[in-house]
Amino acid sequence: MARRLAWGMLGVLIILGTAVAHAAEKPRLNPSGFTPSQVCGTCHQDIYAMWKDSKHARAFENPIFAAAYREVRREGGSAKELCLRCHAPIAGITGDLEARQAVTREGVGCDFCHSVTGVAIRDTGSPFDVEVGATKRGAKVGATSPAHAVQPSILHKSSRLCGGCHEFRNDEGVAVISTFSEWRASSYPSELRACQDCHFVPVSGRIAVQRQGALGATIPDHRLQRSQEQLREAVKLDLVRTTRNAGRLEVVLAVRNIGSGHAVPTGHPSRRLLLKVEARSAGSGALLGDATQTYEKVILGGSGKALLRDVELFLRGREVRDTRITPGQARSETFAFPVPSGEAVRVHAELEYLYRSHVLAGNEWRVQVARHDSLIPGN
């Protein structure tokens, strides 16, 4: 009996000792290659949770990209390098172009961004300079870590870091994605406002979990996007004036980009902003007239036809037709409707943000950005 108790106590001590040893272990960083983001998350728990909820974390495995990537790959050529340079950037550095490694399939992971030392925006093949290993780079000055060396980086406060992916010109010189150059052409650079100021806003959270507790009360929001909220803050819709004359109602509206450092919409050309206006009888509700105006970037092929498929957009685009709203721009739009004399009219206007991918036919993401309603009295 005493021997069984002794062996039992020994077993408990071994288990406790093993647990303590594991608890005291530092994260297993890869000193000569990329470290999986899950390892980063053992200390940076709040940041990791945000990143996992981001489009960066889903850049490689989201179904829209996966379908478009298969389509582009069927075209042959440099499809792997073209697409993976941003959707799985580790692949181009390690040569894992078949994405066999889990760290490659993470998309835009923690260790990739925090290993970047330089960005060449015009290098469409390999825009990032990377130094991988035990030193991690970030915007915070004076940060230390028991798990790895920390180097402060001005680049991580700069829009150039984002521009490596959020800018792409094809072999024809067409800017298929031009978010970085849109920002650069705006007033934001002279105002010292970078991408991070809008997309990396401070939120409550711990930088890292240590025995001493949290290192800070706020952290940059690694979800990076607050899409619907930011759209509604960035774009405003106002009624400028209405004029009635001889059975005709003229409505003038202003669409303004007041809070975005790039064009609205930006990014992939499949995104559009749609202004819809309608006039109805205030009495019967009958529709008296309606109209629309679309703000978009259209990529044209050699024949002048609008291209829709990703493989065409990125590989065969020759020209651009751009009606989007640039930073700080106010666009005035005039609409005219036939209206019976003396009849009161209700005018309804709304702005919708639309995203439709050809690979998911029938599915369209719609967000109402702004609206305006007015009652125009009869004469």
Image (cartoon, rainbow, N blue to C red):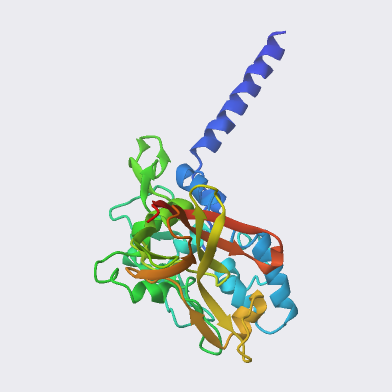
Residue 65: in sight, yes or no?
A: yes
Viewer-nearest residue: 30 or 174: 174
Dividing the picture into quadrants, the one containing residue 250 is bottom left
Give the residue furthest to the left.
Answer: 191
Q: Position of residue 200 (x, y in %)?
A: 39, 55
Residue drawn at the location 55% of the way across and 48% of the way down: 284
Give the residue furthest to the right.
Answer: 74
Q: Position of residue 178 (x, y in %)?
A: 46, 76
Viewer-nearest residue: 238 or 178: 238
Q: Position of residue 217 (x, y in %)?
A: 33, 40
Residue 265: in sight, yes or no?
A: no
Looking at the rendering, in which quadrant would you find the N terminus?
top right
Q: Is 69 drawn above or below residue 378 in the view shown?
A: below
Viewer-nearest residue: 299 or 156: 299
Give the residue furthest to the top.
Answer: 1
Q: Position of residue 170 (x, y in %)?
A: 55, 84
Residue drawn at the location 40% of the way across and 52% of the way down: 374
Residue drawn at the location 56% of the way across and 81% of the way down: 299
